[in-house]
Image (tube, rainbow, N blue to C red):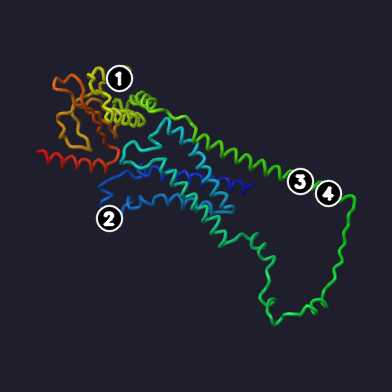
């Protein structure tokens, strides 16, 4: 009983390590956010280990799996369990919260899509290493005994000890075989046949269930309904106004709302969806009439602000819509016609997602500003 309980806890801890491995593959920037100051320093910091931070959960899993018997069962059981959960969650996240599956901005990491690919690659490598190479180099005791059954020492094969056929025939030992078939043996043979048939049926049932499970998982992953471009836009437009009130009484967008706002603003910027509209028409198109008046005032504040990703060189553009959660911010800027009546151009500007990317874009903005002074 204690052995089974210990095995369960080893599997549980190894499962945590496998989940941490997938997380480090998918979202390393959440563990060590990009910081240009620390990353460019010559001194050794934790950021130097960021490219290989995924090794830490592997070492933890090796330690847990090696603390007792059935190491491969614990190791691969945890890895495959996390893989199945990730494959089940993947299409749901892609349909409802795509920011967890693919990057919202081009400078971000690959998210779960890239992390899952790395995870599957690691699973394949560790399977070959543990089940093929290690099994060949260090075979189990049962396999060693089977290999030693037909083992013949080198002294027995020495030509000096060879015998002729006549000598072998003269030294042959006669073995008297006795075959005893009694009425009870037939009954026992029938019992063994039933046992073997039952074992064969169980094996076939287990294989059928495993195959059915893999087919069902593949169908779930491939056939889960995904929203169309229009449906995804409507989903994001309804989510981008979700907010909460912080301790200071300020309304701040949720993290999901900021991601949704970034996708909506990118769509507006790429397709000029607001071109030709007045401010009132653009607000109606965005559905801002459903937003509480207090929060709507925060969203529509047109006063200039300073962003970490740009320099204030675009004096001729107006801040039209601002969505922020206090750390990450998305701003939709507009340019209007000479009469300031209708929108001509819309632009998305973001900041606070990646300090290194913000610093790079700010430098480019300064270079452009110096060029046109």
Residue at mark 2 to residue at mark 4: CA–CA distance: 77 Å
Compare marks 3 and 2 and give the one earlier in the sequence: 2
Q: Which of marks 3 and 2 is in front?
A: 3
Q: Which mark is residue 285?
A: 1
Residue at mark 2 to residue at mark 1: CA–CA distance: 52 Å
Quick one: SS at disc 1? helix
Residue at mark 3 to residue at mark 2: CA–CA distance: 68 Å
- Answer with left or right where residue 355 lies relative to residue 315: right
Disc 1 to disc 3: CB gap under 8 Å: no
Disc 1 to disc 4: CB gap under 8 Å: no
**Pick the front one: 182 or 61:** 182
Q: Which mark is residue 195?
A: 3
Pointer 4 residue:
188
Quick one: SS at disc 4? helix
- Answer with left or right where residue 283 lies relative to residue 96: left
Pointer 2 residue:
43
- Disc 4 crowd rating (10 Å Cα; few below 14, some 14-19, many 20+) is few
Compare marks 1 and 3 and give the one earlier in the sequence: 3
């Amino acid at each position: 009983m204690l052995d089974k309980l210990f095995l369960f806890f080893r599997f549980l801890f190894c499962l945590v390590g496998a989940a941490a491995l997938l997380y480090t593959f998918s979202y390393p920037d959440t563990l060590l956010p990009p910081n240009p100051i620390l990353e460019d320093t010559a001194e050794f910091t934790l950021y130097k280990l960021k490219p290989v931070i995924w090794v830490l959960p592997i070492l933890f899993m090796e330690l847990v799996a090696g603390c007792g018997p059935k190491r491969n069962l614990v190791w691969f059981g945890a890895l495959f369990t996390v893989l199945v959960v990730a494959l089940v969650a993947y299409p749901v996240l892609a349909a409802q919260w795509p920011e967890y599956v693919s990057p919202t901005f081009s400078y971000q990491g690959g998210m779960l899509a890239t992390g899952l690919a790395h995870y599957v690659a690691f699973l394949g490598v560790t399977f070959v290493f543990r089940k093929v190479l290690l099994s060949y180099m260090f075979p189990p005791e049962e396999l060693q005994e089977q290999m030693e059954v037909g083992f013949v020492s080198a002294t027995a094969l020495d030509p000096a000890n060879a015998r002729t056929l006549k000598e072998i025939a003269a030294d042959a030992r006669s073995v008297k075989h006795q075959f005893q078939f009694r009425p009870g043996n037939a009954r026992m043979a029938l019992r063994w046949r039933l046992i073997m048939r039952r074992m064969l049926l169980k094996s076939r049932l287990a294989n059928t269930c495993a195959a059915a499970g893999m087919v069902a998982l593949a169908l779930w992953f491939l056939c889960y309904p995904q929203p169309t471009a229009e449906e995804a836009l409507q989903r994001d437009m309804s989510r981008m106004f979700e907010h909460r009130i912080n301790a200071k009484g300020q309304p701040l967008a949720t993290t999901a709302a900021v991601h949704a706002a970034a996708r909506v603003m990118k769509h507006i910027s790429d397709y000029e969806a607001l071109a030709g509209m007045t401010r009132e028409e653009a607000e109606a198109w965005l559905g801002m009439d459903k937003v509480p008046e207090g929060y709507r005032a925060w969203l529509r504040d047109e006063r200039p602000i300073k962003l970490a990703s740009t320099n204030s060189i675009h004096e001729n553009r107006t801040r039209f819509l601002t969505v922020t959660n206090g750390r990450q911010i998305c701003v939709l800027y507009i340019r209007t016609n000479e009469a300031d009546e209708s929108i001509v151009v819309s632009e998305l500007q973001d900041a606070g997602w990646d300090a290194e990317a913000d610093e790079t874009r700010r430098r480019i903005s300064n270079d452009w500003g110096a060029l046109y002074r």
